[in-house]
Amino acid sequence: MVSASGRYVITFNGEIYNYLDLRRDLETSGPAPAWRGHSDTEVILAAIARWGIGPALERMTGMFALALWDREDRTLHIARDRLGEKPLYYGWLDATLVFASELKALRVHPSWQGHIDRGALALFLRHGYVPAPHSIYQGVRKLTPGTFLSVRADGSSEEKAYWSARNVAERGVAAPFAGSDAEAIETLERLLSRSIAGQMISDVPLGAFLSGGVDSSTVVALMQAQAARPVQTFTIGFREEGHNEAEHAKAVARHLGTDHTELYVTPAEARQVIPRLPELYDEPFSDSSQIPTFLVAQLARRKVTVSLSGDGGDELFGGYNRHFIGRGLWDRLRRVPPGLRSGAASAITSISPAHWNRFLTSFLKLAPAHYRYTNPGEKLHKLALVLGARDPNEIYLGLTSQWKHPSSVVYDGTEPVTALTNGDGSAALPDFTQRMMFLDLVGYLPDDILVKVDRAAMGVSLETRVPMLDHHVVEFAWQVPLSMKIRGGQGKWLLRQLLYKHVPRELIERPKTGFSVPIGEWLRGPLREWAEALLDQARLQREGFFDPAPIRDRWEEHLSGRRDWQESLWTVLMFQAWLEAERAPAAHPMAAARAEAAATISS
């Protein structure tokens, strides 16, 4: 779209939820723009023309990636939303600056080389995703959330932050909310309700994902409180024990009175998604909950075009197990000699997670509800990974690593510095738990959780919106004292109290299970032949990215049942599957477009 003056040209992906407020501000703060329509895109252009790119972005509430060409200054600006809900890649191909929301769009350029960045591959092997600003390709970067990049005609560039998660976290902790518990609950309800109200505005059918957990139930409860008719909610169910939350979601939906749709999926149906993953995710990505996420998006798209999601609650309000056990774990570990810790790790990992699960199940039934972890064996094996930690940061890194030493697996794969390994990149927060939550907010959330949801939904043409990531909610969450987030050995205390105003406690209080599929069992069964082909030693040697020895060792141990290496093996398999798809140009969905683009440009 071209601005009214003709100076600016914009391409824009996303939604600006407060665009009507911005429109009114533009009409009352100066000469009223000559509106040509009613879209948020036109309001963005008018706001930039009036206030400039930086101040306009500061006023916007939404999810977006945009590019703005200033014809007068001959400057290109590309910008991304505050929390990274929408993707934006950019890079130089010869003398051409390219940018897009998807890597597959960049691949059609005739100067595309596509050399794999081995440092980024090492990061992927550690985390299961490629963290911003890196991408899997050399010379291609992800724009950091909350920033805009200005590139002038002479090729010079400058990246600026218009919103900083680090500043928000540091300011919030330095000047905490001083009200009572009741006042905190009231403030959160007001802010979150306002965010949800703005995101429920839609000219197409709208619904919400509902797992029956705290986050999605809170979003749906506040949606239903404001809706004139039953909200459409969607849940995927599995018959396999430990991987199904559909019954809990149905109970919450029944209590709230939503128009609920659930679909029980067979393992075979879930596995049919796997061949589509390289195309859907565009670069290697190995959070296995990508499979049920795609399935629930596909289910929702049958009835709605927009779906709200509860993502963000864990990162903002202390919902991950590591948030409330990490600090205590370090306090205990540092008193134990390293040799004893190493011996304990060996003892734990000598027993498979499945055997631990069977052994511990009867004991956990006697424990309080919030200590009855699902898959306790898997959590014990994660504990073993961090028993050798020398400081709290190593505990967090160990708890969030698929491979502890990925550079020893990836040939020439030296890991670049990230916020996890660079002390200067993290926020100056006094508490270890707060530091973990901050790193989740700027790393795991945008590069894993939001990628997972956005790509799965876009794969079925469903738009997702995440009301907990309204920056007003985020800023308040960082002012909330830690004692209001984690209390009595349980996370998300404040969010739970808000939810209990709408949903009975007994429908919510249960162990956190996550949104998972039994990848480990599938790899020993129906996926074994597929995985064996991708992990073939000769193939790995020929491709030249991985040292086959540690991968084959884990594969053999996993098949034997001695160890459960599902996460680290799935990471390798997702790269291998992506590489296979990426290197099959004849079968590539963009092959025809690439040929057409090359012919057009050459002519």
Image (cartoon, rainbow, N blue to C red):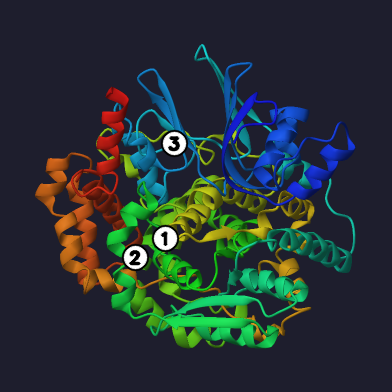
SS of the residue under disc 3: loop
Query: Eyeballing the image, is 576 above or below 407?
Result: below
Query: Is 219 positioned to the left or the right of 562 in the image?
Result: right
Q: In the picture shown, does residue 235 fall above or below 22?
A: below
Q: Residue at x 78, y 60 (%)?
A: 194
Label 1, label 2: how many angstroms apart (C-alpha)?
7 Å
* Spatial CA span between label 3 and label 1: 29 Å
Residue 173 at x, y percent in the picture: 77, 47
Contact flag, marks 1 and 2 (Cβ < 8 Å) = yes
Residues marked 3 and 2 touching at CB (< 8 Å): no
Which mark lies nearer to you, 3 or 2? Answer: 3
Q: Amino acid at mark 1?
A: Ala
Q: Which residue carries the number 1 mark?
A: 384
* Quarter of the image where the N terminus is located: top right
* Label annotation for residue 349: 2
**In the structure shown, which secondary structural element does the residue marked by tag 1 occupy?**
helix
Residue 169: image location, x then y, percent = 71, 44
Q: Residue furthest top?
A: 154
Q: Which residue is mark 3?
A: 134
* Res 15 seen here: yes
The amino acid type found where label 2 is placed reads Thr
Q: Earlier in the sequence, mark 3 or mark 1?
A: 3
- Residue 119 lies left or right of residue 305; in this view the side is left
Kindly report which numbered mark, 3 or 1, lies closer to the viewer in this rendering.
3
Residue 188, image x, y percentages: 79, 62
What residue type is disc 3 on? His
Q: Nearer the viewer, residue 499 or 337?
A: 499
Q: Residue at x 64, y 54 (%)?
A: 433
Instruction: Give the Cα separation between the discs numbered 3 and 2.
Output: 33 Å
Q: Which residue is at the front of the view, 392 or 343? A: 392
Q: Earlier in the sequence, mark 3 or mark 2?
A: 3
